[in-house]
Amino acid sequence: MINILSTQVSAARPAGPAKRLRNLMLGLDRIGYPYVLNAPLDATARLWVHDDPLAVYYLHKTAARAVVGPNLYTLPDEIPSGARLERALYIQPCTWAQRRWELAGFDSCPMTLWPVGEDADRFAPVAGDDGSVLVYHKQRDPAELAALLELLRSAGLTYRLLIYGEYTEDEQRHALAQCAFAVWHSGFETQNHALLETLACDVPMVVWDCTRQSQARSPHRYAAELDDLPVTSAPYFDARCGLKVATLGEILPAIARLGELGASLAPRQYVLDTLPLEGQARAFVALWEHWGLSFDMGLRERPRRAGYWREPLAGKIARLTRREFRERHRRRSDEGPWWSGSR
């Protein structure tokens, strides 16, 4: 059984970290692997600290084996001196993110690659394509977006625009049902769920790729000395998905090329082959083999019934757990650390 510590349980609008949590739970449900949400640190032998930075101060005081990240820190120098990671395994969603941490000197614990699976049932092809273009914009120069939209208009193409943070998931799915292909204009990404959900709907795309951190308008801080490290808007992408381009002038030729490629494009199959929910859930469970905790060992525990989780209850658990942690951390009371379960 895995104890999942995450602040994303009751997220109102799923973004990257919340989708990572949601998709993992879906995958664990499908393979019948048990988990709990925001239990005390020593509640199970396996622990995943998804994005709760307070928990890492106490990892050395529990016998649980911990997998941590990736939504804890942007760069290794953000890890506070009191954080204890020496008995943990840190995960990164893609190879360029892992390489960035290696170049930044991270050596506090072993590190490995694990991307979550994508929900290809929620995002699936729907009849209704009207031939329009989906344009997706996230954390790039607005002047570039304006030039892109003018380019599409000049070519007589009708588009539907999605701007990160300004749409609901229902609006996203409706737009995907109407579009024949997409033009992607986003900053560098470590997985890019929205892009992969678009591919899962069998919508091919042209990616105006972000290949340097300085090209993006990201709210996160990145080390300037690592700007030469190659990044991408689409770390999970191949020829079945469409084309990547580097400049605005390449977009219309790439769109024409999509039409020529025709049946050789299979974006949905790429997602099914590369990031299946069940396959990535099994890969997640296998991370604990680093300590010799086998998959079968977890399955001998009573499996949780798929679908028992309800968001309001889980949200209440998450809020109470975080509040208790903060109060105990502040008081430094004599009753013992919260992770021990003592009262």
Image (cartoon, rainbow, N blue to C red):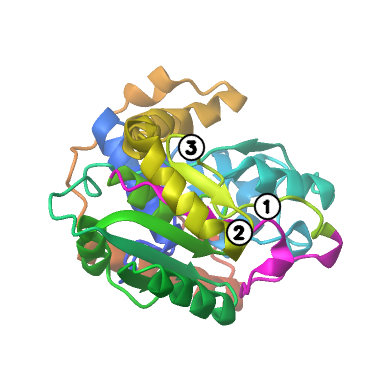
Expressed as whole percent of the image width and height from the top left, the position of residue 43 reads 43, 44
Expressed as whole percent of the image width and height from the top left, the position of residue 284 reads 47, 34
Q: Amino acid at mark 1?
A: Val
- Ranked by sequence position, the earlier of labels 3 and 1 is 3
Q: Nearer the viewer, residue 20 or 164?
A: 164
Expressed as whole percent of the image width and height from the top left, the position of residue 55 reads 57, 58
Q: Residue furthest left?
A: 127
**Region of the chain picked out in magenta, as a range:** 202-225
Residue at image position (42%, 73%) is 154
The residue pinned by badge 2 equals 188
As drawn, the label of residue 231 is: 1
Residue at image position (23%, 37%) is 304
- Ranked by sequence position, the earlier of labels 2 and 1 is 2
| Mark 2 vs 1: CB contact within 8 A | yes
Label 3: how many Cα within 10 Å (few below 14, some 14–19, many 20+): many
Q: Nearer the viewer, residue 108 or 122?
A: 122
Q: Quadrant of residue 299?
A: top left
Expressed as whole percent of the image width and height from the top left, the position of residue 287 reads 54, 30
Q: Nearer the viewer, residue 199 or 191?
A: 199
The residue pinned by badge 3 equals 46
